[in-house]
Amino acid sequence: MFSIIAAGLFGLLGTTLGGYISYKQQKSAAQDERANRKVEQARQWQQDRAAESERRAAEQQEKGREMRRQAAVAFVKQVDDLAESGRTYWVSLREKAHGPELESARSAYLASWQTLASDFASFQLAVTAELNREGIALYGAARDYSVAIDEIADGRRTNAKADRAQDDLLEARRQFIRAAQHDLNPSSATDPADASATT
C-alpha cells in the first residue's frame, strides 16, 4: 500500500512540478512577448517619428524652393519690364517723339526701374548664395542698360553702345535663368549650349 501512496505522491509531485515549470515557461514567454511588443511599438514609434520629420523637412524644402522660385520669377519679370519700357523710351527718343507720348514712355521706364531697384533687396533675401551672385550680375547689367538709356536721353551715348548694353543684359538674363533652373530644379536644368549641340 505504501508503494501505491508513494507512487501517487510522486505522480502528484511530478504533475505539480511539471505544471509549475509549464506555468513559469508560459509566464516567461508572455513576458518576452510583451517585451518584444513594447520594443516593436517603440521601434514603430521611432520610425513614424523619423518619417514625420522627413516629411516636414521635405515640406519645408519645398516651401523654400517655391519662395525662391517666386522671387526669381518676379525678379526676371521686373528686369523684362525694365528692358521693354527702356526699349520703348529709347525708340521714342530715336523717333524724336515729344509731349505726352515721350513723357508716358519716360514715366513707364522710370517706374519699372524704381520697382526693380526697390524690390532687389527682397529678392536677395529670398534666394541662395549662388542665385544671388547671378542676380547681382543681372541687376548690374540692368543698371548698365538703364544708364545707357539715360545717356541716350541726355545725348551722351550712341545707339551702338546702348545696343551692346542691351545684349549684355540679355546674356546676363540667360545666365540668371540657367542658374535659377539649376538651383530650383537641378534634375531638369539644361544648358542652352548643350541643347543646341545635340540638335
Image: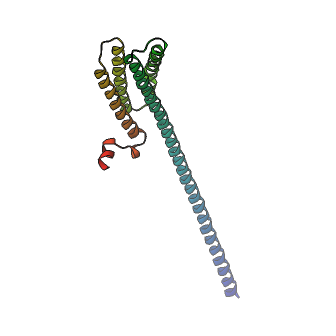
Q: x, y percentage for residue 130?
A: 36, 33
In this rendering, is residue 114 above or below 186?
above
Q: Is residue 51 left or right of residue 79?
A: right
In this rendering, is residue 23 above or below 100?
below
Q: Is residue 54 left or right of residue 11?
A: left
Q: Is residue 161 left or right of residue 52?
A: left
Figure coloring: rainbow
In this rendering, is residue 27 above or below 148?
below
Question: Going 35% across and 30% down the picture, which residue do you hit?
Answer: 170
Q: x, y percentage for residue 44?
A: 55, 53
Question: Of residues 34 and 97, which is closer to you in this image?
Answer: 97
Considering the image in quadrants, where does the N terminus appear? bottom right
Question: Going 47% across and 30% down the picture, which residue do you hit?
Answer: 71
Q: x, y percentage for residue 78?
A: 45, 26
Question: Of residues 171 and 59, which is closer to you in this image?
Answer: 171
Q: x, y percentage for residue 118?
A: 45, 19
Question: Going 47% across and 11% down the picture, which residue do you hit?
Answer: 99
In this rendering, is residue 175 above or below 84?
below
Q: Is residue 123 left or right of residue 147?
A: right
